[in-house]
Amino acid sequence: MVKICCIGAGYVGGPTMAVIAVKCPSIEVVVVDISKSRIAAWNSDQLPIYEPGLDAIVKQCRGKNLFFSTEVEKHVFEADIVFVSVNTPTKTQGLGAGKAADLTYWESAARMIADVSKSDKIVVEKSTVPVKTAEAIEKILTHNSKGIKFQILSNPEFLAEGTAIQDLFKPDRVLIGGRETPEGQIAIQALKDVYAQWVPEERILTTNLWSAELSKLAANAFLAQRISSVNAMSALCEATGANVQQVAYAVGTDTRIGPKFLNASVGFGGSCFQKDILNLVYICECNGLPDVAEYWKQVIKINDYQKSRFVNRVVASMFNTVSNKKIAILGFAFKKDTGDTRETPAIDVCQGLLGDKANLSIYDPQVTEDQIQRDLSMNKFDWDHPIHLQPTSPTTVKKVSVVWDAYEATKDAHGLCILTEWDEFKTLDYQKIYDNMQKPAFVFDGRNIVDANKLREVGFIVYSIGKPLDPWLKDMPAVA
């Protein structure tokens, strides 16, 4: 029986291993993590992450060929294939601060693997890592190998949260990068055999190590670039009276471009886009390519611009001050169908409004009060360190209340901001909400999910990103 061990029980490790277990009943899969609370959650009825379909799979396999454990060294020792899916946060100090990936957790995992192994192993990079990480890991393993042979593979994940299980069941592609040596090819084949149990052969791509590592960063950079492109257009649409949804639709019908990732919004979020682009920027700079680095930096610049433009629009519309006004925030996760708040635009929007002394009332169907308070009080990049290394009890941010109902959030509010495209926000009783708000009542739709004309009929002053402006908003220009 092939044994797989995955180090890191997070958003990547947990779902990926659960799907391998359900699709490969003859393989024993163990997910290990040093966080006792996280492993306890994986072994409970309340999983530590929310992902549609994940619950059923874990319950189906757990205790049969899928296990969650804190006995990291024991299971690494027993495994044939070790996936490493640990945090690779952006460095906050030292060389490459603010851009380079911090490989501290990766390196300690590699040293531990070398330390406890008594048999040959295939070590698979699953975390998003900078190009050439495999080479560094290889050096650590071979210099500490005591005669044991290790093969390093890069197998980046291309999951989208909210559809991760579907993405794993029917991936566009599975990418495996390895050494172009006979031993490297054998290792690639071994991992290919695992995926081939449910993924069609033509969808399993094999490359050299560097291509696999760079493909992941490139894919995320291209996706983020599309979002920043349409968001840049949204600002121009507002200035000219065009409608960004109509423009995006017209552009997306061109088969060379396609319709995906062309929804204008308050900005992109999630654990990968910004981190991977910063990483790409750093790699370009290190390789003497400042013009290429500058090009990719603009994608993040536009994203930051879009968030601050949204805050400025809110403040300018309300007579240039939100001081002591209640603002309802509907949605805090970075997108619908996930509880993930990493790099969510809601953090910057909330902090911008708090900077102008607003009182915030926040509602998100999947995000806890503790998480929201933690996010609003954390330093940049803190979120990407293991949970036990994050600030323990977050200092409660004054002027923020977290509620469990959209109607409660909007009661007596001057304005409401929609920051996540949860389906339930489309079907709220906006007449009821309007009746219970201060007047004039404002809706700032950061996801273009409500019917602005219907809301105007109710009595709201509405701002939708990239849509022709309400006469009221034209009279109160927002200076970015």
Image (cartoon, rainbow, N blue to C red):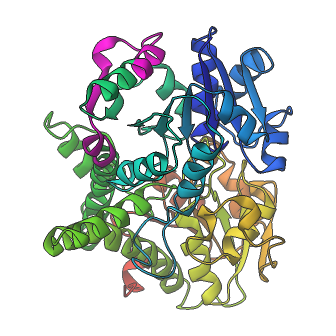
Choose between 113 and 390: the one closer to the eye.
Answer: 113
Q: Find the magenta span and give its range.
A: 190-214
**Residue at the image point whose x is 37% and y is 88% from the top:** 479
Q: Where does residue 86 sit, x and y in percent of width and height?
A: 58, 50
- Residue 278: which quarter of the image? bottom left
Picture layout, residue 108 above or below residue 154: below
Residue 418: image location, x then y, percent:
57, 60
Residue 69 image position (x, y, % from top left):
78, 36
Task: Locate residue 11: give its quadrant.
Answer: top right
Can residue 57 be seen in this snapshot?
yes
Residue 196 magenta-drawn? yes
Q: Residue at x 55, y 63 (%)?
A: 104
Q: Main secondary structure of the magenta part?
A: helix
262 or 195, which lies in front?
195
Quadrant of the image containing the N terminus: top right
Above or below — where is 94 with respect to 426? below
Q: Nearer the viewer, residue 322 or 208?
A: 208
Q: Is residue 343 magenta?
A: no
Q: Which residue is most to the front?
A: 147
What residue is rendered at 76% in x and 32% in y? 68
- Which residue is drawn at the image coordinates 37% and 56% (left, top)? 130
Number of marks drawn: 0
Left or right, 230 with reference to 129: left
In the shown orientation, is residue 325 left or right of residue 212?
right
The correct choice, above or below, for 187 with respect to 329 in the image is: above
Residue 260 horizontal/vertical position (percent) = 32, 40
Residue 240 seen anywhere in this rendered image of the structure: no
Q: Quadrant of the C terminus?
A: bottom left
Quadrant in the picture for residue 406: bottom right
